[in-house]
Amino acid sequence: MEKIKKMGLLGATALIGAGLAAMSEERIREFVKARVKEGAISKEEGKVLVEELVSETRKQRLNLEKNVVEKLHNTLQTADKELADYADSIDEMKIRELEGELEKMKSLRKGDK
C-alpha cells in the first residue's frame, strides 16, 4: 500500500510538470503570434522561434521533473530506512520486555516449588 502511495506522489509530480509545460507552451505560442501580428517578426521566424522555445521549455521541464523525482526518491528511501530502524528498535524493546516477563514467570515458579 505504501508503494502505491509513493508512486501516486511521483505520478502527480510528473503530471504537474506536464501541466506547467503545456501552459508555458500555450503562452509561448500566444506571445509569438502577437509579435507576428505586430510585424516584429515574420511568420516563418515565428514558427522557428516557437519550435526553439517549446523545445527548450520541454528540456527544462524534463530536468525539473527528473530533479523532483530524484529528491522524492531519496527522501522516501531515507524515510523508509528510518522507519525500518524504528521498527527494529520497537522489536528489540518488545523482546526485552518479553524476556523480562519470562524471567518473572520463572522466578514465580521457582518460588512456588
Image (spheres, grey):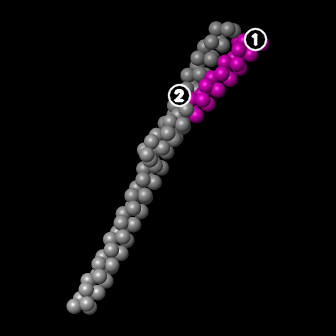
Q: Nearer the viewer, residue 88 or 21?
A: 88
Cβ atoms under marks 1 and 2 closer than 8 Å: no
6 to 30, vertically: above or below: below
Q: Is residue 40 magenta?
A: yes
83 to 67, vertically: above or below: below
The answer, for residue 12, to whether it is visible in the render is yes
Q: Find disc 1 in the rendering and name its residue.
A: 37
Residue at the front extreme, as displayed = 112
> Residue 8 location, x and y as percent?
49, 39
Residue drawn at x 55%, y 26% is 58
Mark 2 lies on a secondary structure that is helix
Q: Is residue 104 magenta?
A: no
How far is the residue under mark 1 from the one under mark 2? 28 Å
The crowding category of the residue bearing disc 1, from other C-alpha atoms within 10 Å (few below 14, some 14 to 19, many at least 20), is few
Q: Find disc 2 in the rendering and name its residue.
A: 59
Residue drawn at x 36%, y 63% is 88
12 to 94, vertically: above or below: above
User: Which quadrant of the structure image shows residue 83?
Assistant: bottom left
80 to 101, vertically: above or below: above
Residue drawn at x 43%, y 58% is 82
Closer to the N terminus: mark 1 or mark 2? 1
> Residue 13 location, x and y as percent?
54, 37
Which region is colored magenta?
Answer: 16-41
